[in-house]
Each structure stands twice: as C-alpha cells, then as structure tokens.
Image (cartoon, rainbow, N blue to C red):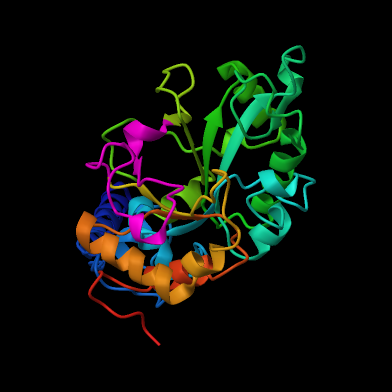
Amino acid sequence: MMSVSLRSSFVALILTFSLFFAGCLGGVEPPVIDPNADSDGDGLPNGYELEVGLNPDDSTDAPTCQGRVEFCLQTYDNFTFAETHNSFATSEDGVLYLAANHDTGLTPQWNGGIRAYMLDTHHKSATETSKEDVVFCHGDPDQSLHPCEYSEVDAFAWLTQLSSYMNESPNDVVSILLENYVPIDHLENLFNQTGLLDRTWVRTAGEEWPTLGEMVLSNHSLVVFWDEGDDPQYPWLHHAWTHSWDTPYGEDEQDEMSCDVGRGDREQPVWHLNNWLSNPLGLSDSQRAEQVNDKETLLARAIECWEEVGNRPTFIAVDWWEDGDVVGVTEELNLMQNWTASAPE
C-alpha cells in the first residue's frame, strides 16, 4: 500500500505535469486567417466566407449566384438584371396582339435569363373584387372599359410558376415591380398563396443593399417594389420611387431616349433603364423593338448612362425581349468592373 507521503508526492507530480502541458497547449496560438486571401480557392475571400457563415477552408460550400461564384460578392445595387416590361402581356398568354408587349410568356423568359418582371395587379372586373379575383392585366381601371375586359392573365398561376422556378434555381436573385390597383392585403394574400412571400427581402430606406450571396444564403432572394408608399405593416413591399428610380419610357423616337430621371430619387443606387418605344397609337412598338434592343446599340446606351449616372443600371427593361439581346447585354455589363472597362473574353 502506497504511503500517504509517497501518494502525496505522486499526486503533486501529476498536477505539475498537467499544469505544464496545459500551459503548453493553451499557449498555442490559432492560425491567423487572412480575410483577403482565398484559402480554399473557391473564389470567395476568407473574410466574406466567415461573415456569411461559410467555412473558408471548405471549397465545396461556396454558392453560385446568377450562375457564377464571384457574383455572390456583388451587391444588389451593383449588378444588372434583364427585365421585361408588362411581363405577363404576351401573345402566348392569350393577350390580344395590340395589347401585348412580348410574344412569349414566363417559361421562355425564365429560360432565356430574365430575372426581373414588371407586373400589373387588378381585380377581374368592377364587381369581382375579392382576394381571389386578383389578375394581371394592363390599363386604367377608371376608364369606361375595364382593362381586364380584353385580356387577363391568372396572377396566382403565373406567380406559382415563378415560385417553382425559384425553387429549382435557389441561387438566382429575382425582382418584381408592381403597378398595383388592388388593396394591399389582397397583394399579400397573392404572394402568400403562391409561396413567394417567405422569400422576400426586406430593406429599410437608407440601408445598404446586401450582396447577392447574402440574399441567396438567407433564402430571401426576391425583392418586390411597388408604386405606392412604404407601409410598416407590409415591409416587404418597397416603394419603388423611394428605394429606386427610373428613366422615361415609351418615347416616340429612339433619339429621345435619355438617362434622365422619370420617377424617383436619383440619389438611390438602384435604377431602371427603360428601353422601349411607342407607336403612333401609344402602344408598344413591336416594329422597332429589334432596333432598340440590338445588342451593340443597347450596350452602348447602358454604358453611356452608367457613365452619366455614376453607377451601372440595376435593371434594363424592354418590350419584345425576344428581339435583340437584352440578356447578352446584362451578361457583358456584369463582367465589367466599371464603365471604362471591357468585358473579359
């Protein structure tokens, strides 16, 4: 049996060794992570990965945004999206040709790279005004002929399809601009029933816009603007002309197009470059769409406005998107660091 004195000496020896090794181990400094380096080679700086909850040593956890990892670093207001004006007003959706703005509907638009949509919400008629009667159509409801008399598109089906596409492509940021003629709670019901409400990004006026990566990783990759004011009860609906601005639209002649303010606050970094002409009847001019949507022509206009405004257009909105190459223009712009640069080959 070990004596008391010997046992005490043995315990003291163990404690001494324990303290020694604890001190040695505790004194090991963790490796310093350079926030500007890219340790895992995934295209995202270490500091950004730590900020958004990714592992800077794991190359497999990097998301892509709009198809490229590096686009995740771009802020929403420093990226350009292809946008369709009156996106629902298509011949494919049964809209009369004189009232149409495009030949093809949502599916070809999505597959073709359109990620921003201008939509008009109305009730079906003056007597059909419930939450379930919200549809897409275009025109002034105060006129003698209700705008949905000559054509309407099922808003619930349209947005449900958009929600499905977003489920299939969760790393794509999407935007909607609403011209609205229904009560605000009817809008919320529409977006809730179609599965889009939970996806919406909420921004307070004056806040900096997030990166595309932050939006994608948070699963709040839908930004909704509308033409009415901000309402604290519905913070997901951003007043378009408080949070952004646009250029004039529907000019008679191409040489009348400008980079001037049509609506909103030019101090805002998010803005729409409107790019369509009106015919002598005041309707969308399909005959000259290819002329104004021509890739070289539209790219030159976008760069000219980028220089004049001081930041790239967030949206390039067109009619007859099938004519010309608005998506190709935005792809080239997004590879340019500034308006003087050339897109990489």
* Side (left or right) of 85 relative to 28: right
Q: Where is residue 14 shown, x and y percent of the image? A: 30, 58
Is the C terminus in the top left, top right, bottom left or bottom right quadrant?
bottom left
Q: Where is residue 28 shown, x and y percent of the image? A: 23, 65
Residue 262 shows up from this direction: yes
Residue 17 falls in image quadrant: bottom left
* Side (left or right) of 271 relative to 252: left
Residue 246 falls in image quadrant: top left
Above or below, comparing residue 48 to residue 134 in the picture: below
Q: Which residues are magenta?
A: 239-268
Above or below, comparing residue 154 to residue 231 in the picture: below
Q: Where is residue 344 shown, x and y percent of the image? A: 36, 83
Identified at 34% across, 71% down, the residue is 300
Identified at 34% across, 30% down, the residue is 204
* Side (left or right) of 166 relative to 154: left
Q: Where is residue 330 shown, x and y percent of the image? A: 45, 66
Residue 53 shows up from this direction: no
Residue at the limit of the structure toward the top, as seen here: 127
Q: Nearer the viewer, residue 140 or 239?
A: 140
Above or below, comparing residue 175 to residue 123 in the picture: below
Prevalent SS, magenta region: loop
Residue at the limit of the structure toward the front, as seen here: 280
Instruction: Give the number of marks.
Output: 0
Magenta segment: does it hold 284?
A: no
Magenta segment: does it hold 256?
A: yes
Identified at 50% across, 69% down, the residue is 291
Identified at 59% across, 61% down, the residue is 321
Q: Nearer the viewer, residue 24 or 303?
A: 303
* Side (left or right) of 21 relative to 102: left
